[in-house]
Image (spheres, grey):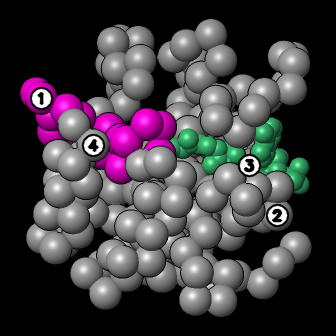
Amino acid sequence: MDDYSTRLLTPETWDAFATLVEANNGVWGGCWCMNFHPEGFGTTPSVSGNRAAKEAHTRAGTVHQMLVYAGEQCVGWCQFGSPVELPNIKNSRAYEKDAADLPDWRIGCIFTGSKHRGRGVARAAVEAVLVEIRAAGGGVVEAYPEQVEMRGPQRGAFFHTGPETLFEEFGFERDRKIAKWRWVMRLSLTP
Ligand SMILES: CC(C)(COP(=O)(O)OP(=O)(O)OC[C@H]1O[C@@H](n2cnc3c(N)ncnc32)[C@H](O)[C@@H]1OP(=O)(O)O)[C@@H](O)C(=O)NCCC(=O)NCCS
């Protein structure tokens, strides 16, 4: 595994983040990792609008996102935040149907640059997020990953909320199923 460092997305690290997104066509055709945020893709989605909205969140301090660096290059990230900060999860109707209580934290989108996959970037990102959450007081953390077992090999592109196996490594457990291949997984972190 390569040697990585991690930094939060802030106005100081914005350029490194933006360089990675631009090198990957805006990610998902230009979402700029906006979908979990309150405005989602907005009422009139556009790549430049998504970019501006993400930058505005970064400058306002309304985003939590752990960036992974190989040297000085940002090669991936893991988004996290409170349910207020990240209200838009996929399969929300199924999610809400059996939701007993909201978590303290959510893990949103995970992304590794296409040339850096399969070398532990996502693992480094999730590990650093959990350290950060613990330092902030801990609590219940939810992730919404895709099931890996009992289906054929999937390209990384299908795992924008991460593969289930990655979260199992950190002790997350299945809470409930919200789509054919998507689970709510939970982990309780003490400070
Ligand atoms: C899914 C994704 C984040 C994985 O990132 P990565 O840095 O390659 O993952 P890692 O190397 O840290 O892998 C950690 C573990 O996750 C699992 N994993 C990773 N990619 C996988 C895949 N394609 N299929 C099954 N399991 C996978 C494995 O258990 C792996 O451990 P192992 O290598 O010991 O088997 C990456 O493929 C990606 O970015 N896909 C695009 C997602 C996207 O579009 N996000 C948009 C967000 S806005």
Q: Main secondary structure of the magenta part?
A: loop
Marks 1 and 3 sit apart, C-alpha to C-alpha, by: 34 Å
Q: Amino acid at mark 3?
A: Leu
Label 4 belongs to which residue? Answer: 47
114 relative position to 7: left or right: right
Measured in 3D between alpha carbons, the distance from the residue under mark 2 to the one under mark 4, in whole angstroms, is 29 Å
Q: Is residue 70 left or right of residue 24?
A: right
Q: Disc 1 vs disc 3: which is toward the camera?
A: 1
Q: Are marks 3 and 2 in contact (CB under 8 Å)?
A: no
The N terminus - image quarter? bottom right
The residue at the point 43 percent across, 36 percent down is 29
Foreground residue, 86 or 189? Answer: 86
Side (left or right) of 124 relative to 160: right
Q: Give the residue number, with chain letter if any, for mark 1.
A: 44
Closer to us: 28 or 57: 28
* Residue sitting at x 45%, y 58%: 21
Mark 4 and mark 1: Cα distance apart in space: 10 Å
Identify the residue position indicated by label 2 in the image: 119
Q: Earlier in the sequence, mark 1 or mark 3?
A: 1
Q: Which residues are magenta?
A: 27-45
